[in-house]
Amino acid sequence: MFMIEVGEYKVKEGLYYTKDHEWAQVLEDGTVLVGITDYAQKELGDLAYVELPEVGKAVSKGDLLCEIESVKAVSEVYAPVSGEVIEVNEELEDSPELLNEDPYGNWIAKLKPSNLEEELRELMDAGAYAKYLESL
């Protein structure tokens, strides 16, 4: 996968993005991985804790998915698409810094989407997200 560089930030191609700096990756089986962007992890600073969502939790697009605590602040992570949480990345419980080290290689939750095609159209691709970052 290619990366687009916007100043000090990297944007991974092939993902979908929100204005709240979450990314969504559609897997071959139709499930969706959710994580935070390079911009988000750099703005937060050193991550201290990830409050993972509950497996089985139903979320609508834009709902609070979980919270991330850093040395600077507590930040909310929102669901980029509607669906059910079917898996969480338990490695983050002991090692939240994985999101700092590789924000695109480490996901937070896996969703079984309920309205994927329509909601993906409302998200940005890598090029649009890179332009969005330039405007901040």
Image (cartoon, helix red, strand yellow):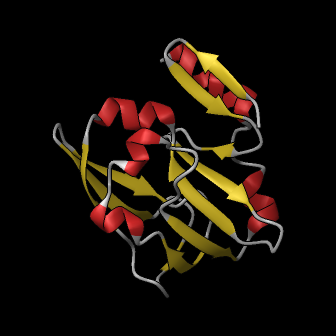
Residue 7 placement (x, y as % from top left): 53, 11
Residue 49 placement (x, y as % from top left): 24, 57
State which quarter of the image contains the N terminus. top right
Residue 100 placement (x, y as % from top left): 39, 40
Foreground: 120 or 8?
A: 8
Rendered image quadrant of residue 82? bottom right
Residue at screen point 19% across, 42% down? 73
Residue at screen point 71% across, 72% down? 31
Rendered image quadrant of residue 42? top left
Q: Is residue 93 above or below residue 120?
A: below
Q: Identify the residue at the far bottom of this view.
A: 56
Q: Identify the residue at the far top of this view.
A: 7
Q: Is residue 101 above or below residue 112?
A: above
Give the left or right position of residue 37, taking residue 115 as reference: left
Residue at screen point 74% across, 36% down? 13
Foreground: 114 or 41?
A: 41
Q: Is residue 46 above or below residue 95?
A: above
Rendered image quadrant of residue 67? bottom left
Callout count: 0
Q: Is residue 24 above or below residue 55?
A: above
Residue 109 placement (x, y as % from top left): 51, 67
Give the left or right position of residue 2, taking residue 62 as reference: right
Residue at screen point 47% across, 18% down? 136
